[in-house]
Amino acid sequence: MPLYGHELSDSITPLEAGLASFVKLDKPDFIGREALLAHASPERHRVGLKVTSRGIIREHQDIYADGKPVGITTSGTFCPFLAGAFAMALVNADIPSEGARLEVDVRGRRVEAETVPLPFYKRPKKPASAQTK
């Protein structure tokens, strides 16, 4: 879940955070509409990261692709249920949401990560017969 102050803030728009489905730009005027329209094609977007080497990614760590800076992490931790370390990040719009191999600077050491779809986990749907009981 995107959290205000991490994946959303005064400098991170709902469009960058991947929440466009909650922003109705076709509505008549509303507070912030013009600011959102000015950034309707974000230069960065929120992605999920799965750590593929040893390490745990936290917030505010630089992300690199082929040695070039491409973004920054917004949050991260070890997820026992998923048996691995995961994070969310804001990366350049040209970085794919799935399958991009990246490196994250964790206290001076590069940790390998891969972009993965969000959300990290989806609860399985119950069969229709179980929902009526």
Image (cartoon, rainbow, N blue to C red):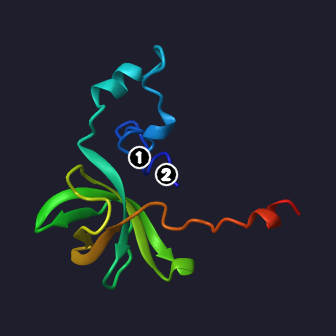
| Quarter of image, res 104 | bottom left
> Which residue position is annotated with label 2?
2
**Where residue 95 appears, x then y in whole percent?**
22, 57
Badge 1 amino acid: Gly
In this figure, what is the number of numbered marks?
2
Quadrant of residue 61 in the image?
bottom left
Q: Which residue shows up at 42% across the image and 25% down it?
A: 25
- SS at mark 1 in the image: loop
| Residues marked 2 and 1 touching at CB (< 8 Å) | yes
Q: Is residue 50 left or right of residue 71?
A: right
Front residue of this view, candidates 100 and 84: 100
Give the image location of residue 118, x and y in percent. Answer: 44, 60
User: Taking 62 as reference, is 78 above or below it?
Assistant: below
Picture coordinates of residue 87, whole percent (x, y): 40, 66
The residue closer to the viewer here, 3 or 17, is: 17
Q: In this picture, is 118 found above or below 82?
A: above
Q: Residue furthest top?
A: 29
Q: Outermost residue, left direction? A: 67
- Give the position of the C terminus as an image quadrant: bottom right
Query: Which of disc 1 and disc 2 is earlier in sequence?
Result: 2
Q: Which mark is residue 8?
A: none
Task: Assess disc 2: are there few (<14), some (14-19) or many (≥20) residues with their C-alpha within 10 Å of its C-alpha.
Answer: some
How packed mark 1 is, by other alpha carbons closer than 10 Å (few <14, some 14-19, many 20 or more), is: some
- Which residue sits at x=34%, y=38%? 11
Q: Which mark is residue 18?
A: 1
- Up-down: is 118 above or below 20? below
> Image quadrant of residue 35?
top left
- The mark closer to the camera, 2 or 1, is 1
Q: Residue visible at 38% across and 38% down?
A: 13
Q: Secondary structure at mark 2?
A: loop
Amino acid under label 2?
A: Pro
Alpha carbon separation for disc pair 2 and 1: 9 Å
